[in-house]
Image (cartoon, rainbow, N blue to C red):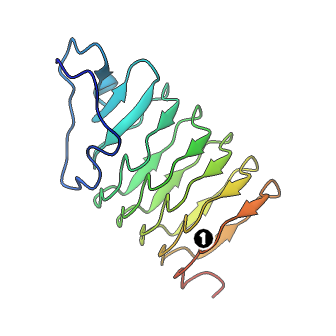
Amino acid sequence: KSVTSIGKHAFACCNSFESIVVEEGNTAYDSREGCNAIIEKSTNRLITGCNNTIIPNNIKSIESYAFSGCDKIEKIIIPSDITSIEAYTFYGCSSLKNVTIPQNLKSIGDYAFSGCESLDNITLPSSVATIGIGAFKECESIEEFVLPNSLTRIEDHTFDCCYCLGN
């Protein structure tokens, strides 16, 4: 209840978390709507999630590394207010198979989905302009990837070790 500051990546790679709850009355953070995440109230930014997080619709951004190593997540829906997926956000989520991306997403950060070896397809909306370094590296199950016309930059090593692409 008394926590007023959480440092960057404080819970990175805590892959065994099944539940996260912020105590009622905390002035800086909450776990609204039973979302199983820590949300910074002043910015509506999701700081960290876990294997059972459901991202609330009013979230404006997701901290980098927020889901890093959550290896039991199979599906995630990213709300429409999110315009960028930060670096390492879903890094190493090896069971992640299905991601719903909002129509107004503009960028995908470095290594955002790297190591999501179960991810089998992903559709990027026509709003995406940039994809960061290694963003889909080692996503071994992706069979099809459609690049939108809006894309202006794909960084180095974006699809390294995506063995199924093009087969």
Measuring from the top left, give residue 22's x and y in whole percent: 21, 25
Amino acid beneath label 1: Thr
**Residue 123 against residue 31 in the figure, above or below:** below
Measuring from the top left, give residue 6's x and y in whole percent: 28, 32
Quadrant location, the N terminus: top left
Numbered marks: total: 1
Measuring from the top left, give residue 85's x and y in whole percent: 54, 47
Closer to the camera in the image, 96 or 27: 27
Q: Residue at x 58, y 31 (%)?
A: 81
Closer to the camera in the image, 147 or 13: 13
Q: On the rendered structure, is 85 left or right of 46?
A: right
**Residue 88 against residue 139 in the figure, above or below:** above
**Residue 113 against residue 60 in the figure, above or below:** below
Label 1: few (<14), some or many (≥20) within 10 Å?
many
Q: Residue at x 44, y 56 (%)?
A: 88
Q: On the rendered structure, is 18 left or right of 44?
A: left
Q: On the rendered structure, is 123 left or right of 115?
A: right
Image quadrant in which you'd find residue 123? bottom right
Q: Residue at x 42, y 55 (%)?
A: 90
Query: Residue most toward the right?
Result: 149
Quadrant location, the C terminus: bottom right
Measuring from the top left, give residue 106's x and y in whole percent: 68, 45
Image quadrant in which you'd find residue 72? bottom left
Query: Residue most toward the bottom?
Result: 167
Q: Residue at x 23, y 15 (%)?
A: 26
| Residue on which disc 1 sits | 158
